[in-house]
Image (tube, rainbow, N blue to C red):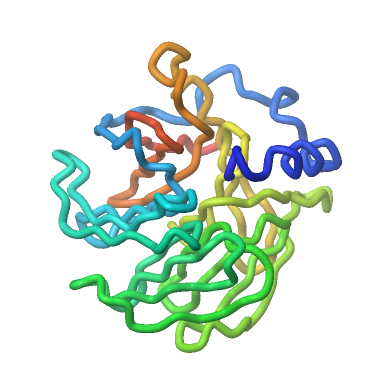
Amino acid sequence: MRTLYLIFLGITLIAGCTKDKPSADVPAEPDYEIINIYPHNTSYFTQGFEFAGDTLVEGTGHYGNSKLIKYNISDSQNYGEISLSSGYFGEGITVLEGKIYQLTWQENTCFVYDYTDMNKLNEFSYTGEGWGICNDGENLIMSDGSSSLYFRDPSDFSILRTISVKDSNNIAYSLLNELEFAEGRIFANVWQAEYIVEIDPLTGIVTDKYYLTDLMSQEEYSASDVMNGIAYKNGHFFVTGKYWPKIFELELKNK
């Protein structure tokens, strides 16, 4: 998630996590097909990633460098950009009914902006950390680094219900990071993992896991950070990471 700030926490949580180890079930064949590759700004510490029509909306992190940007994925044409004040570490973003919602990491604040002019409309407070956020067309869905996902009312950010994310063996999946809602399922990055999980929004059960190994070559990505960023459009998933130079348009393979 935020490598410079949570390295100790990350090591502790990963060591104590009982979910399946990635090396145990990495498929012989890739779980994806690359459809297209687009440029990505290597100064973006990607935290939130979502399409609104044909426009890509991205939120970035780090104190003093957290932004919200709207741009064209093909040529990187900028359609609007705002910066958070230096006291806020930007996290996940989502677009719902003409508004952009942007979480902050430890500042317990969700900012709400008008999608068109990006003027701030409101802000909500919450307890705990902010990691990822998406929406199902009606409710906001938020992660906080635990194995829980919180469905929230977009009008006041109150919690409507909570699901615990686990596999069919009742083993919890924590460190859920950037989120995307697509095809009736929640898709989540797992911090510091090279796979994304597909989650049933009613039960919290992980219904699939897609390994995205080999997207990064050591030469091109030597200065990059972890994979983080899932967007969905026209049946394809668009995946990137923190400081990555590329966005990959993928077709995930049915299993």
Q: Is residue 146 left or right of residue 73?
A: right
The quarter of the picture where the N terminus appears is top right
The residue furthest bottom is 156
Q: How many marks?
A: 0
The quarter of the picture where the C terminus appears is top right
Q: Position of residue 158 (x, y in %)?
A: 59, 85
Q: Is residue 14 left or right of residue 83?
A: right
Q: Which residue occupies 57% across, 31% down?
A: 194
Q: Is residue 195 placed above or below 125 in the rendered structure?
A: above
Q: Which one is nearer the viewer's eye here, 250 or 61?
A: 61
The residue furthest top is 219
Q: Position of residue 148 (x, y in %)?
A: 70, 63
Q: Which one is nearer the viewer's eye here, 254 or 67?
A: 67
Can you tell which quarter of the image residue 43 is in?
Answer: top left
Can you tell which quarter of the image residue 32 is in?
Answer: top left
Q: Which residue occupies 45% across, 23% down?
A: 223
Q: Position of residue 216 (x, y in %)?
A: 45, 22
Q: Which residue occupies 65% across, 65% down?
A: 149
Q: Which one is nearer the viewer's eye here, 12 or 134?
A: 12
Q: Is residue 217 placed above or below 212 in the rendered structure?
A: above
Q: Which residue occupies 20% across, 55% down?
A: 54
Q: Is residue 98 placed above or below 197 in the rendered structure?
A: below
Q: Position of residue 175 (x, y in %)?
A: 68, 49
Q: Is residue 167 left or right of residue 59?
A: right
Q: Is residue 220 placed above or below 210 in the rendered structure?
A: above
